[in-house]
Image: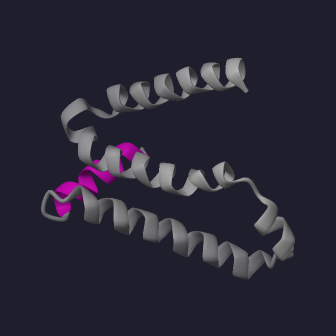
Amino acid sequence: LQATANGNFRKNLGDNPLFAAYFSILGTFVTATLAMLALRPAAPAGSALRETPWWNWIGGPLGALIVLAGAALTARLGAALFIALVVGGQLLCSLLLDHYA
């Protein structure tokens, strides 16, 4: 559903995948902010943030690239093929990480 929604969003915004990805991620930010305000979880310690390995922070940028790719490619590939390629890539990366980590 997300890939198709972002692909259609791109079409509705003048065939611009960057704006589709931006507004989709903005929706994610607003949703997460509202959840934080509603649930009020305890903030992590500053030391925990500083001591977190650099590679723990790449989920956000990689997620943004997936949203951008979905907005740009779903119309051409179709949602099923796009999702199959994403899942295939995740499986391959998981195998490599499990083998070498």
Above or below, 9 relative to 72: below
Q: Give the residue furthest to the bottom.
A: 37
Task: Tell me, yes or no, whether the highlighted magenta stretch contains residue 26.
Answer: no
Q: Nearer the viewer, residue 7 or 49?
A: 49
> Could you tell me if residue 44 is visible in this image?
no
- In this picture, is 51 found above or below 89? below
Q: How many marks?
A: 0
- Relative to 68, is 88 on the left or the right? right
**Left/right of residue 51 with respect to residue 26 in the rendered view:** right
Query: Which residue lies at the image location 77% right of the left edge and 68% below the top edge?
Result: 50
Which residue lies at the image location 73% right of the left edge and 53% below the top edge?
A: 53
Extent of the magenta region: 2-12
Whether residue 58 is situated above or below residue 88 in the rendered picture: below
* Location of residue 57 by image quarter: bottom right
Where 18 falls versus 87 (above or below)?
Answer: below
Tell me residue 2's x, y (percent).
42, 48
Percent position of residue 7, x then y: 27, 49
Per the picture, the main secondary structure of the magenta-coloured stretch is helix
State the image coordinates of residue 73 (x, y, percent, origin top left).
25, 40
Chosen colour scheme: one colour
Pick the front one: 89 or 40: 89
Residue plotted at (40% across, 26% down): 85
Q: Which quarter shows the N terminus?
A: top left
Instruction: Note whether residue 88 is visible.
Output: yes
Q: Dividing the image into 4 quarters, which one contains the C terminus? A: top right
